[in-house]
Amino acid sequence: MPGWLKDAVFYEIYPQSFYDSNGDGIGDLNGITEKLGEIRELGCNALWINPCYDSPFRDAGYDVRDYKKVAPRYGTNEDLERLFSRTHDAGIHVLLDLVPGHTSEEHRWFQESRRAEENEFSKRYIWTDGWLTGTPGHPYIAGESERPACYMLNFFKCQPALNYGFLHPIYPWQSAMDSPEALATREAIKDVMRFWLDRGCDGFRVDMADSLVKDDDEDKSGTCALWRDIRQMLDSEYPEAALVAEWSNPRLAIASAGFHMDFYLDHQGNGYNTLMRDYWGKEGDRSFFKSDGKGNIQRFLDDYLPKLEVSRGRGYISFISCNHDTRRPRYSLSERELKVAYTCLYTLPGVPFVYYGDEIGMRYQELKTKEGGYDRTGTRTPMQWKPGKNLGFSEADPEVLYLPVDPAQDAPTLEQAKADPDSLYHLVKKVIAIRHEYASLQADGSFTVLYAEKEKVPFVYARGEGEDRIIVAVNPSLSEASAQIPAGAGEMLFSVGEAAAENAEGSGKGAVLTLGPQSAVILRAAD
Ligand code: NOJ
């Protein structure tokens, strides 16, 4: 396990929209390098950069045309290497995005693969043996290649599936996982990983990590075995490199496949979804952090605790404020609601991720789709640095920006947020700073629920043990709430809103915490 993950707090950057250093209207790598000081100032010590490789950008770069070349619109390979060395100087680790399940249809491998003449890449993708033979149970494309066969898709039409084999091949055109062609694909992806790790990258966020071996069983035993093999390669050649899965199933991703971290993604009905984004159902917004959400923290805990249990000692669950596929939390939560939510999110175990702009409460924008974004597009707008032209994102004419900046008069900016001690930005910064200060609050610190009653607030939990124990209590509701806890309350490290703790007489009898409306508190335990 890479030791640096224990105290890592990640910042996710969608490179298109972070900072445009050369005035062409789109963000770039040098722009990220220029703004490293801001990321450090917030307290983040690790980055995840969405795909920055050469691509036709039909899926915002998740359709890779050349894994080993930086997209010219973002800069050059040298710019990326400089970014690695500057981040390391600043004590920041960097994960790139690895897209192993598919390439762009414009990738050279696919261009070769689709040819009628057999060649080295003929089996690099999943092709059937007939021009009218589909791929049962999977989307496929017919009639597009000179080769008399159909090919399987992994996501969009522009993303043919790479061939890692089938768990139990049935048809003659299906490769086994240990066939030379499936192993060649696996080696090719290892080669891509080594290429960037050798240049200074610290690991990868792995796109659709569960999608590699086809017709896998329920426990994804084929795909998990494949990742264990890749993890072995990392352990022996790059022991400090980290892998985070886009999987959202720690039982498989962490305990079986060997990922160091797994994202807790916003999947309707799961525990994470009940915290901030439970607004799709008929009953209105039931999110726990909505002040009138009639939230029920048990819905979160029922899903989360088994996941935490299975990942303990093996890897980390990663809570996200949002990501490039998810609606920004500010879509439904007010700044005050977010303050309470973030206090909780960033004091939970595992390795947290801040999505760029969420620290200042950037809003979701209603926009037409861009580069295959569809309703994800509104979450991908440019970072808002300061008032004025393009909110400081770019010197280009507003019409040529990759996406428009938030047009609202009161669009939040980093500059204004920094000047206001009460801003969301300062809350995030403070909570992250406390997290760095107390090991109990970091990835490995234990998690004990102290008060969590169905349809009641507050939610109170302890992190760590003994003298180092930290207590966190949150009350998202509009009413005062109190809870009796079995631990005494000591020094108050941080609070939002009104919060008080009254210790019982004598020692070891616990305390009563009283939290005003929409409040949160971080305390040291006294006993
Ligand atoms: C998940 C990525 O997060 C998403 O943005 C992308 O469209 C798909 N995988 C396909 O690669």
Image (spheres, helix red, strand yellow):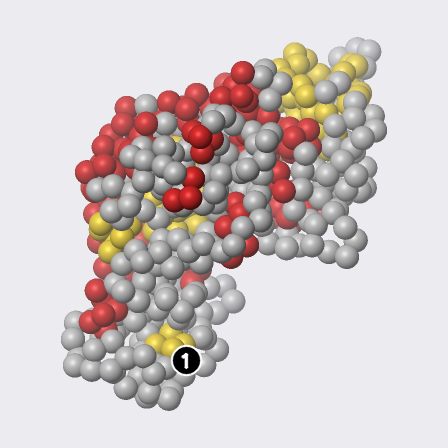
User: Would you name the residue on which mark 1 appears?
Assistant: 135
User: Is 250 displayed left or right of 488 in the figure?
Assistant: left
Asked if residue 384 shows in the view, the reply is: yes
Can you give x and y, in whole percent of width and height, for residue 449 in the image? 69, 34
Question: Vertical placement of 212 versus 67: above or below?
Answer: below
User: Is 134 displayed left or right of 477 in the figure?
Assistant: left
Pick whichever, 392 or 507, lies toward us. 392
Establish whether ligand 1 lies closer than 8 Å to the Cβ of label 1: no
Would you identify the image quadrant in which residue 36 lies?
A: top left
User: Is 4 displayed left or right of 270 in the figure?
Assistant: left
Q: In what quadrant of the picture does the C terminus appear?
A: top right
Q: Secondary structure at mark 1?
A: loop
Residue type (three-letter) at the residue carrying disc 1: Thr
Pick whichever, 188 or 393, lies toward us. 393
Can you give x and y, in whole percent of width and height, for residue 23 in the image? 32, 35
Q: In what quadrant of the picture does the N terminus appear?
A: top left
Can you give x and y, in whole percent of width and height, for residue 215 in the image? 44, 73
Pick whichever, 309 or 106, lies toward us. 106
Q: What residue is drawn where x is 30% and y is 71%?
A: 125
Q: What residue is drawn where x is 53% and y is 47%?
A: 378
Would you identify the image quadrant in which residue 110 lies?
A: bottom left
